Amino acid sequence: MLGNVLIVDDSGLSRRMVKKCVTSTGLEASEYLEAADGAEALDTLKSTSVDLLITDLNMPNVDGYALVDGIEFGTPMAPRFVVVISSTASETVAEELISKGVSAVVCKPISPDSLKSVFEGLDLIE
């Protein structure tokens, strides 16, 4: 079982949809947390252990790019896995995000099957 999962998106509807897709993959987590933007997510990461962070890229205030830049990868408070979901990420952007420490980039629209494939690749589920 995975620890906490943090879902970051400025749309509450999108956060609920992502959670539904994640739970449909069979991934078991201790708790699902939500943040409406990167600033809120970074605040959560300062006080709460998160195993999996799933974030949108395009958000007001602090976007997904700034969120990724703000994560101190390799430290105890950094999420073990970071998955970016985007409708605009090109292959070049995906490669850049992965070079910064992101585990995977998934193109919208997402589905339980697309997330399951990513989670299997990360050995989060069998």
Image (spheres, rainbow, N blue to C red):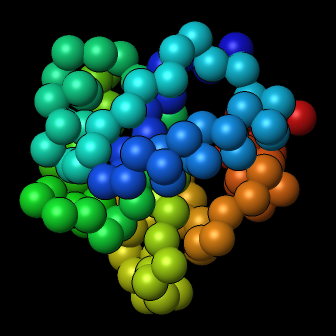
Task: Give the x, y percent position of residue 62.
Answer: 14, 57
Task: Give the x, y percent position of residue 15.
Answer: 48, 45
- The structure residue drawn at horizontal position 60% and vertical position 38%, both measured from the top left corner, is 19
Question: Residue placed farthest to the right in the image?
Answer: 126
- The structure residue drawn at horizontal position 58% and vertical position 11%, both measured from the top left corner, is 30
Residue 124 visible, this orientation: yes
- In-image side of 93 versus 36 (left or right): right
Decide which of 20, 80 is in the foreground and name it: 20
Write down the quadrant of residue 3 in the picture. Answer: top right
- The structure residue drawn at horizontal position 41% and vertical position 25%, both measured from the top left corner, is 33
- In-image side of 22 versus 74 (left or right): right
- The structure residue drawn at horizontal position 49% and vertical position 49%, both measured from the top left corner, is 13
Decide which of 86, 11 is in the foreground and name it: 11
Decide which of 82, 86 is in the foreground and name it: 86
Q: Is residue 38 above or below residue 6?
A: below
Q: Is residue 112 above or below residue 22?
A: below
Residue 69 visible, this orientation: no
In the rendered image, which quarter contains the C terminus? top right
In the rendered image, which quarter contains the N terminus? top right
Q: Is residue 85 above or below residue 33?
A: below
Question: Residue placed farthest to the front in the image?
Answer: 13
Task: Give the x, y percent position of residue 88.
Answer: 44, 84
- In-image side of 18 versus 110 (left or right): left
- In-image side of 9 versus 84 (left or right): left
Total marks drawn? 0
